[in-house]
Every structure is written in structure tokens, then in C-alpha cells.
Image (tube, rainbow, N blue to C red):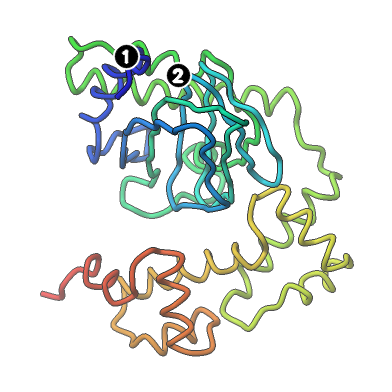
Amino acid sequence: MRENAAAYAIPLRLLQRLMLHPIRIGGLSVILLDALSAEHDADWAHPPHRHPWYEFNYVSRGGLFTTSAGEEFRIEAGQSYLIPPGAVHAHRHGRGESDDGFCLRWQIMLEDGRPADGMSEEAEFIRCFSQVRPYALKAESAAPLLALRTDMSLLTLETAFAGWMTGLFEDWRARAAEHPVQAQDHADVIVRQTLLFLQAYYATELRVQEIANALHVSYRTLARLFRQQTGLTVVEKLNDIRIRQAKKLLIETDLPMKQIAFAVGLKNEFYFSNLFSRVAMTTPSDFRGLHKVPQV
């Protein structure tokens, strides 16, 4: 770690103590998966990619450009940015540029392990953090993390981390209230209706053109609006839904892979296995072996 990392070296080491310890926020459980330094040499670039966790990146020195939801934005020293699960993004330096900082990765689940949905405060919390934010966060956003002290107990560190997350949530919720999305916003309506289609018909051989036809828009318009608002293509979101449902079937049933493939709208076991491995980063068999509770 370079000398200029000293400003975040101690907070990073303290955050590493929280890794894999469930942290309660209301009815939610936050699992910090990783807390690592992020030092990139000059002229670094990372191609478009996505991941299944929330990722918060703080830049201590230098700067970089990040593209998220098709929009490129600049992050300077002292600023940070958030990438939600599934959002396609890429990074690059300006010519001759480098940067230092740290990266936090976490998951948010209901305490019983189920994803939060509906209109609960927990669901609102997850929706807020899952919103694609193609801009640098204000410098104060990382201040509570940088203020962590070595004399803090593990419980105090957990409380401070939870306080940092709820602080972001309240700030973003307040901003949303100041600038509410209008009910008649055409793009918002199209995206919401597309999500309803995907949730209702993921188990069929659903095609994007069918959704576009039903919503009376062109394929191109639907694809553009959906990606702008979610950071994903319609097919990527459909695949995410299918794999999430497949995970439930792998854990909760003894159905063979072929039947699970059909149940989530995929035409054969081979295609299902390839898609599952690409999205979940593990094979269906390994996922079932790791998560299924043995029958007593």
C-alpha cells in the first residue's frame, strides 16, 4: 500500500473486521463481503462488467472515469461512487492518470435470507441502494467511514457502519422526495410495465419484441429506455429473474436440472447450466450442494 493510502489504511483495516458478520438494520441483514484497497496504475482501464453485490468505491488520490447505465462521469480524489448489483459499468483513467482508494462489497437481505420486496421500509431501503447512480457522490459521503477509530469495539464498528448506510439512505430518500418522479413519466411507465412482464412471464419463451408490441413502442425504444433506467438490457434482467427463481428451486426442491430449466423458461439443461454459471458464477450442482439443507 502506498504512502498516500495512509488516510484510509486504518479505517480499511477496521472495516475488514466486519467482513462476513451480519449487521442488522431494522429487519435487514447486511453482509460485508470484502473491504480492500483499490490501487490502479497509470492508464488502467476495465471493460464493461457487472457483479452480484453492491460496491462502494472511494478515491483517495488521483481520479478516474466510470461509465454506468451508459453515462460516463468523473470521480476526483475525496469522492466516491456506488455500483448496485447487476449494473453494467466500466472504468478508465485519463492519459497518464492513476488512482488509490478502497472498495467495499456487500449484500443486503431480509434476516430470514429472502430478498425484500413489496412496500415495506426494508424493500424501500434495498430499492434506494439498488438505483443506478451515474455520478460521483459528494465528499461527505465517505466521512463516517474515514472517521472510524482503533479504540472502537466490534459492536461500535458495526453500529457505525449501519449508521453510515442509513445516512446514505436518508439523504437519497430526501432527494427523491424533493424531485419525485412524475406518474406520467413515459420512460418510468414503460420500464415498470416491462418489469411486470418479466416477472409474470419469465417461465415462458418470452421475447423482447413481444413486450415492445404489447406496450406499443418499438424494440429500439424499449431497449434504450430500459437500459437507461436500470443499467441492464431487458434480456439481462430476464436472465437475472430466471436464475433467481432457479436458485429457489435448487434449494427448495429435488427437481432434476432439466425440469428446473423448463420451469424458468429455458429450453434445455445445457443452456440452463451455461447461463446459471455465467450469472451466478457457480454451477447449478455446486450451488445446490452448498445451499440445500439435507432432509432429516
Is 230 rendered above or below residue 213? above
- Checking the image for residue 50, the label placed there is none
Which residue lies under the disc numbered 1?
A: 6
Q: Nearer the viewer, residue 162 or 284?
A: 284
Which amino acid type is shown beneath numbered disc 2? Ser
Q: Quadrant of the N terminus?
A: top left
Which amino acid type is shown beneath numbered disc 1? Ala
Q: Nearer the viewer, residue 91 or 135?
A: 91
Write the residue at 54% across / 36% down: 43
The mark nearer the N terminus, 1 or 2, is 1
Along the horizontal axis of the image, is 258 left or right of 285?
Answer: right
Which secondary structure lies at badge 2? strand
Write the residue at 59% across / 25% down: 75
Q: In the picture, residue 95 is in which quadrant?
A: top right
On the image, the x and y values in percent for residue 85 come to: 50, 49
Q: CA distance from mark 1 to mark 2?
A: 9 Å
Which secondary structure lies at badge 1? helix
Which residue lies under the disc numbered 2?
A: 60
Count of number-bearing discs: 2
Q: Tell me the crowding category of disc 1: few under 14, some 14 to 19, or many 20 or more residues within 10 angstroms, Cα based.
A: few
Write the residue at 64% across / 28% down: 74
Q: Nearer the viewer, residue 286 or 131?
A: 286
On the image, the x and y values in percent for residue 11 come to: 30, 18
Q: Residue furthest left?
A: 296
Q: Residue furthest front?
A: 96
On the image, the x and y values in percent for residue 245 come to: 46, 70
Is 128 rendered above or below residue 175? below
Q: Quadrant of the C terminus?
A: bottom left
Q: Tell me the crowding category of disc 2: few under 14, some 14 to 19, or many 20 or more residues within 10 angstroms, Cα based.
A: many
Q: In the picture, residue 92 is in which quadrant?
A: top right
